[in-house]
Amino acid sequence: MKRTAKIIKSSEDGKRLIAVDIENFEEIVYFLEENKLTKKFDLICNTILLGLRNTELYDKENINDRCKSVTAMKFKGRKNTRIYCTEVKQKNKTLVIVTSELLPKKKNQKNKQKEKSIIEKVASYEYKIEK
């Protein structure tokens, strides 16, 4: 499914970018602001942009071969929120992380059917990246 994503953050060297799915932008921003998670979102984005690996904040959601490019931003706490993302490698080797789908509350340790269906949906998205 073709979708559009808009770049919202960039690393200093321009090799890593954070983008947001245009269709879900308002829902994600509203939820983050409403639940006071914007600082945590900025922390996760900065960790990604610096190229640091922290699986407590951001990690692959490797449930099957079709979903290899799907990752999750993890907002652990009472609600255990997830933002599922797609990693898109561009021709110039720039890595774009597109925040695609919001899961407001994850209730279990493992990925159950609800999470798996969202991850598979995100894996089916193809993005046109806009600046």
Image (cartoon, grey):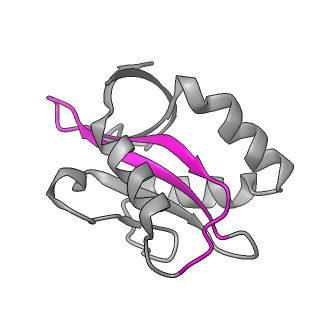
13 within the magenta span: no
The answer to whether any part of residue 50 appears in the image is no
Q: Position of residue 14 (x, y in %)?
A: 36, 37
Q: Quadrant of residue 124?
A: top left
Q: Position of residue 122 (x, y in %)?
A: 38, 43
93 within the magenta span: yes
The reply, left or right, for residue 47 in relation to residue 60 is: right
Farthest residue, direction front:
113
- The structure residue drawn at horizontal position 50% and vertical position 77%, both measured from the top left corner, is 56
Quarter of the image with the N terminus in it:
top left
Instruction: Please give the range of residues in magenta.
Output: 80-108
The reply, left or right, for residue 118 in relation to residue 42 is: left
36 versus 3 height, above or below: below
The reply, left or right, for residue 91 in relation to residue 42 is: left
Q: Position of residue 76 (x, y in %)?
A: 64, 74
Farthest residue, direction bottom:
109
Task: Give whichever of 41, 126 is nearer the camera.
Answer: 126
- The structure residue drawn at horizontal position 67% and vertical position 63%, both measured from the top left corner, is 105
**Main structural element of the magenta stretch: helix, strand or loop?**
strand
Q: Position of residue 73 (x, y in %)?
A: 51, 59
The answer to whether any part of residue 2 appears in the image is yes
